[in-house]
Image (tube, grey):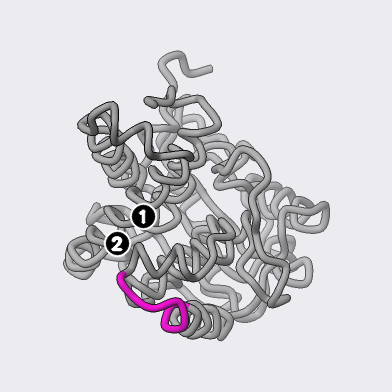
Amino acid sequence: MRPATDSPQYRHLFGVAYRILGSVHDAEDAIGEALARWQSLDTADRDLIREPLAWLTRVVSRICLDQLGSARARRESYAGIWLPEPVPGTIGPAGPTNRPTDPADAVTLDESVSLALLRAMESLAPAERVALILHDVFGLDYTEIGSIVGRTPQACRQLASVARRRVRDRPRFQPDDEERARAVLAFTAACTTGDLGALVEVLAPDIVVRSDGGGATGIARVPVTGLDRVARFLLGIASARSSEGRLTAVPAMVNNRTGLVIGLDGATIAVMDFAVAGGLIAEIAIVLNPDKLRAWHREDPP
């Protein structure tokens, strides 16, 4: 079994790996290693595996678990704020899964790839993160998860419970619905026209903006907070960039939700993801690091 990169099977594996690692490159490497292990099995061993995708899911998860320690060390030495790589469109699984309906506050499929929640999960221990994602998002039972993380089913249940409680200490944000889309469109119009009053109206009072520039100069290396500071910060960026060329802000699907792709003379220079609560934008993640925007580059800019 070697699924094509556009197949439902590959999308499923990428959905698992990306949620655990928050990195497109690392997720693709984990899948590549798992597929190599599959190819190395002899025919007799492969015939014993009734569900190849389930086997690959377990192997990919274990590889990702092993990678989380070194990934955290790299991110602690990262220049400025580290944010996950934004992904165009939607992130698997492509079809239905056995996601649990209980407890009611389980992490949902789309929520689990928001940049805000992925960043929040950086505070979890590796086993906690894997247990939470595999159980809440992909519906694996705790016995299966135990075989991956090397714990008892009871211990895995506790890991997921602790992880769920820790990520739920932060506000719950709206899914990609009409109210959320309206907030993003109003934000776009205000920034495009430089209307400070209109921008303030769509931002929450305790708004937070985090920018990942990969160490580039001129990018805020600490979160910008507060309504007035954030509004002036955003309009200042828009004004400065527009003086460099033709600046565009185009709504697009970013990690399963409506976000913005910022272009300068046709080239993508930033991708923005929004956390919206009560119709107001509460958090903004701005990814400007070129190494994290490769999937958004076009060969033929408009």
The three-letter amino acid code for the residue at tag 1 is Ser
| Quarter occupied by the N terminus | top left
Is residue 162 visible in the rendered structure shown here?
A: yes
Between the C-alphas of marks 2 and 1, the distance is: 6 Å
Whether 249 is drawn above or below 279: the answer is: above
Is residue 291 visible in the rendered structure shown here?
A: no
Q: Is residue 228 left or right of residue 188?
A: left
Range drawn in magenta: 150-156
Q: Report the front residue among 121 and 199.
A: 121
**Disc 2 target residue:** 65
- Residue depicted at 24% across the width and 37% down the height: 37
The x, y position of residue 28, in whole percent, is 32, 39
Residue 40, quarter of picture: top left
The x, y position of residue 297, in whole percent, is 41, 27
**Disc 1 target residue:** 61
Residue 136, quarter of picture: bottom right
Q: Report the front residue among 58 and 71.
A: 58
